[in-house]
Image (spheres, grey):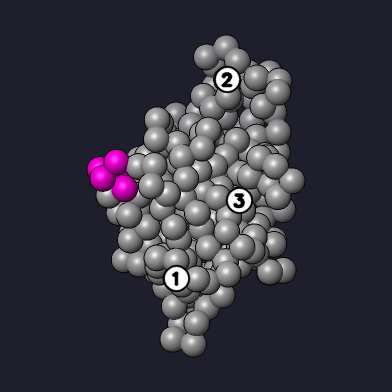
Amino acid sequence: MFGDIAVPKGFQNADRCTSRGCKWGRSRNGLVYVPYVIANQYSSNERQVIEQGLRSFSEVSCIRFVPHEGQRDFLHIQSHSGCYSYLGRQGGGQIVSLQRRGCVYYRIVQHELLHALGFHHEQNRSDRDKHIRIVFQNIIPAQEHNFKRRDTNNLATPYDYNSVMHYSRYAFSRNNEPTMIPIPDRNVAIGEAQSMSPNDILRINRLYCS
């Protein structure tokens, strides 16, 4: 679902599930510990990129990705086919796939970890139609579901073209024409973030750390 979000029955801004149990719990000290395991599939350089992405959250928020030490719920980072994550805490060991070929980049690690924390793509948020026009005639028919608007909790933050969660202008294009056009200024750059934006960081802190 939505390109890189896995669903429990298979591989399918804050989702509403974060108010119903898919949010990671906060400890008494105010920090949110999210255990992880990195599979032995990666080179030392690839592992370094993944660990850099994991550490980046502790620099800007109360989120602490920590090595798994027997906790029931944890992220299992593996190289499967493609880049994807479940949305929020699912219970038990949940896969975050970072395929060695094409996914082990700092921005993608952050992107998939934000999914694991419960965040949707920016272009799927509830108010997106005020900020972006979806050009359905340019979308690969089988990929139209990637552009479905969701009932999201936007945490009183503005729509962010610079979010690391925003897809590019030509995502899932069938004809090399744009599938998304910003409004009112169609020339605004979208989907080019190399790391979390200030708004991405603000959302994490409002959802987990306030």
Secondary structure under the numbered disc 2 in the rendered image: loop
Above or below, 34 relative to 38: below
Density class for disc 2 (Cα within 10 Å; few <14, some 14-19, many ≥20) is: some
Above or below, 52 relative to 144: below
Q: Of the numbered discs in the image, which one, if any, rests on residue 149?
A: none
**Looking at the picture, how far across and down is residue 104, in whole percent?**
37, 39
Mark 1: amino acid = Glu
In the depicted view, which residue is nearer to us: 12 or 56?
Answer: 12
In the depicted view, which residue is nearer to us: 149 or 34?
Answer: 34
In the depicted view, which residue is nearer to us: 28 or 44?
Answer: 44
According to the image, label 3 marks what residue?
86
Q: Quadrant of residue 91?
A: bottom right
Secondary structure under the numbered disc 3 in the rendered image: strand
Q: Is residue 161 magenta?
A: no
Indicate left or right for 49 with 144 as reference: left
Mark 2: amino acid = Ser
Dominant secondary structure (helix, strand or loop) of the stretch shown in magenta: helix
Indicate left or right for 23 with 69 as reference: right
According to the image, label 2 marks what residue?
173
**Looking at the picture, how far across and down is residue 180, in whole percent?**
57, 29
Nearer-N-terminus badge (3/1): 1
**Alpha carbon of mark 3 to alpha carbon of mark 1: how far?**
21 Å
According to the image, label 1 marks what residue?
69
Q: From which residue to which does the magenta span run?
A: 43-47
